[in-house]
Amino acid sequence: MLRYNENHAPLVKVVYSQVKVNGKTELVPLELYADGSLKRSYG
């Protein structure tokens, strides 16, 4: 199933960004869209 963002750009892949939370490094999934925008992925 294809997912699209507000600009109707298709989802390319999910990339993981390292974010420091309370001194711990956590991986946060981000959705990368064809127009280059990133959106936080919520499962």
Image (cartoon, rainbow, N blue to C red):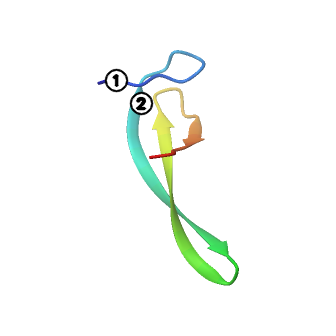
Label drawn at residue 11: 2
Label 2, residues with CA under 10 Å away: few <14, some 14-19, many ≥20:
many
Q: Residue furthest bottom?
A: 23
Left or right, 33 with reference to 12: right
What residue lies at 44% left-to-right and 52% top-to-bottom?
15
Label drawn at residue 38: none
- Residue receiving disc 1: 2
SS class, disc 1: loop
Image spot of residue 10 (x, y percent): 42, 23
Q: Residue furthest right?
A: 22
Residue 36, compared with residue 22, is above or below; it is above
What residue lies at 67% left-to-right and 74% top-to-bottom?
21
Q: Residue furthest front?
A: 43
Q: Earlier in the sequence, mark 2 or mark 1?
A: 1
Marks 2/1: CA–CA distance: 7 Å
Residue 19, compared with residue 22, is above or below; it is above
Residue 21, compared with residue 17, is above or below; it is below
What residue lies at 60% left-to-right and 19% top-to-bottom?
6
Q: Are marks 2 and 1 in contact (CB under 8 Å)?
A: yes
Image spot of residue 42 (x, y percent): 51, 45
Image spot of residue 24 (x, y percent): 61, 82
Type of the residue with mark 2: Leu
Q: Quadrant of the N terminus?
A: top left
Label 1, residues with CA under 10 Å away: few <14, some 14-19, many ≥20:
few
Residue 3, compared with residue 42, is above or below; it is above
SS class, disc 2: strand
Type of the residue with mark 1: Leu
Q: Residue furthest left?
A: 1
Image spot of residue 38 (x, y percent): 57, 40
User: Which marked residue is nearer to the observer: mark 2 or mark 1?
Assistant: 1
What residue lies at 44% left-to-right and 46% top-to-bottom?
43
